[in-house]
């Protein structure tokens, strides 16, 4: 399925980009780009290629699995076979898959993020984090989140883009469909400090703990409230789409823990959603916490563990934490 004429190498060799992808990972990133370009073509075909939004099962996390979740999972796993990546931990797999006996890296991946949007033509994505291989497949991933060597996401929308970082800032590459090349379009993304946009699923308002309710109340009161100005809300229900908007024009995203059974630690998974996004956002000058403490300081103790997640413009994320400091409720 991977399209051999999708090349990342040429744009990587265009000088600045080559310095930003560690040489041992060039091949793996090129393979990920080829798989992503194939997936972008499949998504663009919509119903012509079949009913990719149909439910085909459930994953360990209890989430409904769509046909495209499974297709994307197989696509990325197969693309990486024979690369330097030997351990594969996926949202769609119960445990770690060994792609090869030997290798230098493991990938934690959400093959298709925003699955609820497949059938309604809204941007979806793929999120991944890369870790140095450890003594066992599980140990590669069950460690402090800041031990990752790189992270990225593909967004499948009006443009197909790769946003990636290996610790030297966050870069953006845009797929040129006419050449199959991912072209460097931003050498160092920087999240705007000022913002008037927040992203949260407000249908859960009555389930939130008091600090989050108070933070959102203050925003909703606008210029007559304590913030003294108006704010705007966005909620796409596709983490990659929210991240791409926030990396581009600022904002703050919140998926807190709440009182619903199973949502005590929120909905989003640390290993292959929150930690890679936190890495990218932090490298772009932003901030990412669980409401109070840095995401990247969190150790992963199980592959599919969830965490409350707040990220975006640095000061806005820091302000959320002050609502906890003045609140005596226990951590979510
Ligand atoms: P996934 O499709 O990989 O399960 O991810 C969906 C996530 C994330 O993309 C989004 O921010 C969130 O679920 C939306 O949750 P709600 O449907 O509860 O708003
Ligand atoms: Mn997801
Ligand atoms: Mn997913």
Image: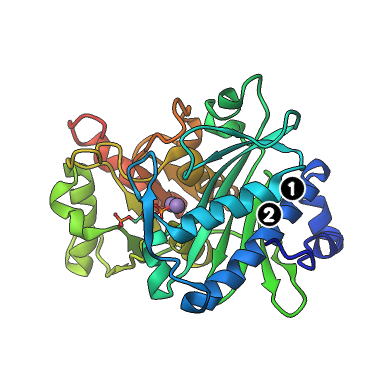
Q: How many marks?
A: 2
Residue under the image location 72 percent in, 34 percent down: 100
Residues at badges 2 and 1 in contact (C-beta under 8 Å)? yes
Residue under the image location 79 percent in, 68 percent down: 5
Question: In whole angstroms, how far apart are the C-alphas of marks 2 and 1?
Answer: 6 Å
Residue under the image location 45 percent in, 66 percent down: 52
* Residue 264: image location, x then y, percent: 25, 37
Residue 90, above or below 190? above
| Label 1: few (<14), some (14–19) or many (≥20) C-alpha neighbours in 10 Å | some
Q: Looking at the rendering, which quadrant does residue 163 occupy?
A: bottom right
- Residue 150 in view (yes/no): yes
Residue furthest to the left in view is 206
* Residue 16: image location, x then y, percent: 82, 59
104 left or right, relative to 91:
right
The image quadrant where one finds the N terminus is: bottom right
**Which mark identifies residue 32?**
2
* Residue 51: image location, x then y, percent: 43, 70
| Camera-nearest residue between 306 and 279 | 306
Local SS, label 2: helix
| Disc 2 CB within 8 Å of nearest ligand 3 atom | no
Q: Which residue is mark 1?
A: 28
- Residue 193 in view (yes/no): no
| Label 2: few (<14), some (14–19) or many (≥20) C-alpha neighbours in 10 Å | many
| Camera-nearest residue between 92 and 56 | 56
């Amino acid at each position: 399925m991977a399209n051999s004429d999708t090349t990342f190498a040429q744009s990587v060799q265009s000088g600045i980009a080559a310095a930003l992808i560690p040489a041992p990972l060039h091949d793996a990133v090129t393979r990920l780009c080829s798989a992503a370009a194939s997936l972008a073509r499949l998504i663009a075909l919509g119903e012509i290629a079949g009913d990719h939004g149909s439910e085909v099962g459930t994953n360990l996390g209890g989430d409904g699995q769509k046909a495209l979740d499974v297709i994307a999972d197989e696509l990325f796993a197969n693309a990486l076979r024979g690369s330097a990546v030997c351990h594969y931990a996926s949202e769609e797999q119960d445990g770690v898959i060994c792609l090869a006996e030997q290798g230098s890296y493991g990938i934690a991946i959400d093959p298709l993020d925003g699955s609820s949007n497949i059938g309604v033509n809204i941007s979806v994505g793929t999120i991944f984090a890369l870790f140095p291989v450890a003594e066992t497949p599980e140990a590669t991933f069950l460690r402090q989140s800041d031990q990752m060597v790189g992270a990225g996401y593909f967004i499948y929308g009006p443009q197909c883009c790769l946003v990636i970082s290996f610790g030297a800032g966050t870069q953006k590459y845009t797929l040129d469909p006419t050449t199959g090349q991912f072209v460097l379009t931003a050498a160092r993304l920087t999240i705007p400090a000022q913002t008037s946009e927040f992203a949260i699923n407000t249908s859960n308002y009555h389930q939130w703990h008091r600090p989050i309710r108070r933070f959102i109340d203050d925003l909703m009161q606008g210029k007559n409230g304590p913030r003294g100005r108006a704010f705007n809300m966005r909620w796409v229900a596709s983490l990659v789409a929210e991240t791409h908007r926030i990396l581009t024009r600022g904002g703050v995203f919140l998926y807190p823990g709440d009182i619903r059974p199973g949502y005590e630690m929120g909905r989003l998974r640390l290993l292959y959603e929150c930690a890679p996004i936190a890495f990218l956002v932090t490298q772009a000058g932003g901030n990412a916490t669980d409401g109070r403490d840095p995401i990247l300081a969190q150790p992963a103790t199980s592959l599919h563990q969830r965490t409350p997640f707040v990220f975006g413009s640095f000061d806005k994320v820091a302000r959320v934490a002050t609502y906890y400091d003045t609140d005596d409720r226990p951590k979510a």
